[in-house]
Amino acid sequence: KSKIDLTAQLSKAVKSNLNPRFINVIVAGRIDLPGKIKINKSSSLNEAILMKGGIKPLSGRISFLRYSDEGLIDKRSFKYSKRSSKGSYKNPILKNGDVIIVGQSGLNVATKLIKEITSPFIGIKAAYDILD
């Protein structure tokens, strides 16, 4: 039996690195401020997305990746929902190292494809107009 007060032991455990108060998560894709974020350990997927500025219009599905200590990957793909309850499949409580990727919609992909196809012709036309 320990002679140290229980509240003192709990306070020391919370302050130690064994039970960190904050975790690091990566949020990428079609959001306003993509990158790494340090958040409270009880935060959810939706809260992390909101802290990074929210999703951009015409965004696609969410890809959620979690690597377990055993080396397994929990990979989920779903539509974003602001109303998903905290701790649910579409809004999990985050763990250190989780990765959230906001995908592109079909319209985004089509727009990029059209731009890649037409950009050489636009350059040729501009050069022709200058020489003419």
Image: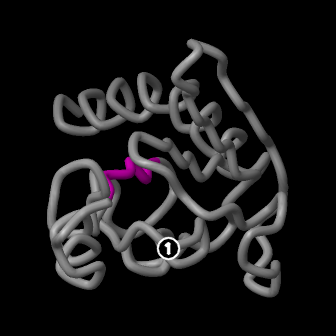
Residue 14 image-quadrant placement: bottom left
Q: Residue at x 52, y 78 (%)?
A: 47
Please identify the dominant SS of the magenta region. strand
Who is closer to the viewer here, 98 or 114? 98
Specify whether 73 is left or right of 29: right
Specify whether 73 is left or right of 14: right
Who is closer to the viewer here, 119 or 36? 36
Callout 1 crowding tier (Cα within 10 Å): few <14, some 14–19, many ≥20: some
Asked whether residue 120 is drawn in magenta, I would say no
Image coordinates for residue 67, horizontal then vertical, percent: 55, 27
How is colour applied across the structure in the image?
A: one colour
Image coordinates for residue 49, horizontal then vertical, percent: 50, 70
Image coordinates for residue 77, horizontal then vertical, percent: 80, 43
Q: Is residue 95 visible?
A: yes
Q: Residue at x 72, y 67 (%)?
A: 91
Specify whether 42 is left or right of 58: left
State whether residue 75 is above or below residue 105.
Answer: above
Residue 72 image-quadrant placement: top right
Q: Which residues are magenta?
A: 23-28
State whether residue 59 is above or below residue 63.
Answer: below
Quarter holding the N terminus is bottom left
State whether residue 109 is above or below residue 28.
Answer: above
Q: Which element carries disc 1, helix, strand or loop?
A: loop
Who is closer to the viewer here, 104 or 8? 8
Image coordinates for residue 50, horizontal then vertical, percent: 48, 80
